[in-house]
């Protein structure tokens, strides 16, 4: 055998080993090439017939044949063992594949994205604020008197340094107006915290979607129109109507609660709307002049509307989720339904 033959045999051996379908086939190849009567022995015996000036190179080639073939045998055996004896050879390519299980977006994140997308399409931009707030932004600047029950430590989580976990996303209104001149048109999704006792519709941590539109001559009619546009898009029903019910918030005057005609029954009355024909979507109103004063806006020049919606409550209505706690338990059987 000459030097080229060794090289050729080696390539053939390596290819054969790499394609061996199971451990038995690898072992047969090992014996054929490296065994006591294998090809390596023939190569070694052949060295005596090689001219002296080629002996060195021949010896090196023989050595590399031995080490490379042995490495290939070991590597193939390991691969086959790791694959549990299965390899590409013998696989039925016509069988359906096994999909790796992928994660999904949490329904709350997905709903926030959807809602934000709808408001973006009518000119709103996204604003954010900190979860840890001070009393000025969470209460004072929002015209909330010292005596207001929401300031009570039984309702609000206070931190040792006097800051607090924001109880709503309305402080984002203040932070944004402090740093931007009117006109302002923002949507602010975020987490809120309250010392509410957890039950089917309350959680100590939940999400709100805040909206604020400030410019010259903004009216309650615009609030109604924009709410109508939003709910129609979100629920995918063009016949949805909006109803405003008088309410009270310290930071809006007048204040309202926003209801929409049920997306399931169209207002006839069904289980989803508790047979009233209407579903509440959030609180809203015209920005109180005191709020404008707190951020340095002139209430004689601008007006604005603001709203705040509970995202979990919206998700519960939209997806028919009976208990808010299902949204936090992270049971994959529940979450998989929102793929
Ligand atoms: C507010 O928080 C006002 N900041 C909303 C607002 C903004 C009014 C701008 C006017 C102008 P309220 O306390 O009603 O309002 O909360 C708004 C929504 O948050 C509720 O309708 C409800 O959907 C949701 N929410 C409140 N508390 C909880 C809770 N513990 N768990 C889950 N969702 C809650």
Image: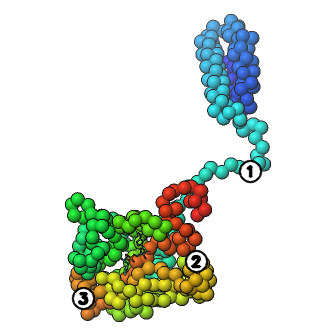
Q: Is 214 left, or right, of 202 in this rendering?
A: left
Tell me which corner region of the image, top left, top right, bottom left or bottom right, holds residue 293: bottom left
Quarter occupied by residue 171: bottom left
Of residue 290 and residue 246, the one placed in the foreground of this image is 246
Assess disc 3: are there few (<14), some (14-19) or many (≥20) residues with their C-alpha within 10 Å of its C-alpha: some
Which label sits on residue 221? Answer: none
Residue bearing mark 1: 96
Looking at this view, is 328 or 338 the one in front?
328
Residue 298: which numbered mark, if any? 3
Q: Is residue 273 left or right of residue 39?
A: left
Up-down relation of residue 95 to residue 237 (above or below)? above
On the image, the x and y values in percent for residue 16 come to 73, 28
> First in sequence: mark 2 or mark 3?
2
Q: Residue at x 39, y 73 (%)?
A: 188
Furthest residue in direction top, as rendered: 48
Residue at (58% x, 64% y) in the render: 338
Q: Are marks 1 and 3 in contact (CB under 8 Å)?
A: no
Distance of mark 2 from mark 1, alpha carbons? 40 Å
Quadrant position of the N terminus in the picture: top right
Residue 68 placed where, x, y %?
A: 62, 23
Residue under label 2, please give it. Answer: 272
């Amino acid at each position: 055998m000459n030097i080229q033959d060794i090289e050729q045999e080696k390539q053939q051996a390596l290819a054969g080993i790499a394609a061996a379908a199971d451990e038995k086939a690898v072992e047969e190849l090992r014996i054929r090439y490296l065994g006591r009567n294998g090809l390596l022995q023939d190569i070694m015996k052949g060295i005596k017939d090689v001219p002296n000036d080629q002996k060195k190179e021949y010896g090196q080639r023989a050595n590399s044949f031995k080490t490379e073939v042995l490495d290939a045998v070991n590597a193939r055996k390991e691969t086959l063992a790791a694959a549990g004896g299965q390899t590409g050879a013998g696989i039925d390519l016509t069988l359906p594949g096994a999909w790796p299980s992928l994660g999904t977006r949490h329904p709350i994140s997905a709903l926030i994205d959807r809602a934000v997308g709808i408001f973006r399409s009518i000119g709103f931009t996204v604003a954010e604020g900190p979860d840890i707030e001070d009393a000025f932004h969470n209460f004072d600047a929002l015209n909330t008197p010292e005596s207001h029950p929401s300031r009570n430590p039984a309702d609000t989580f206070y931190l040792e340094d006097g800051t607090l976990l924001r109880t709503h996303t309305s402080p984002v209104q203040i932070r944004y107006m402090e740093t931007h001149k009117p006109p302002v048109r923002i949507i602010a999704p975020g987490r809120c915290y309250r010392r509410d006792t957890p039950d089917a519709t309350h959680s100590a941590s939940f999400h709100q979607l805040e909206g604020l539109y400030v410019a010259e001559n903004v009216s309650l009619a615009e609030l109604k129109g924009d709410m109508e546009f939003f709910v129609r898009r979100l629920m995918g029903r063009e016949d949805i109507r909006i109803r405003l019910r008088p309410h009270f918030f310290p930071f809006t005057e007048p204040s309202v609660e926003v209801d929409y005609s049920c997306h399931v029954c169209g207002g006839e009355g069904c289980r989803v709307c508790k047979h009233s024909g209407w579903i509440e979507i959030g609180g809203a109103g015209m920005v109180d002049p005191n709020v404008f004063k707190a951020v340095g806006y002139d209430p004689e020049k601008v007006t604005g509307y603001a709203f705040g919606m509970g995202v979990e409550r919206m998700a519960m209505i939209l997806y028919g989720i009976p208990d808010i706690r299902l949204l936090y338990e992270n049971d994959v059987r529940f979450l998989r339904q929102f793929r």
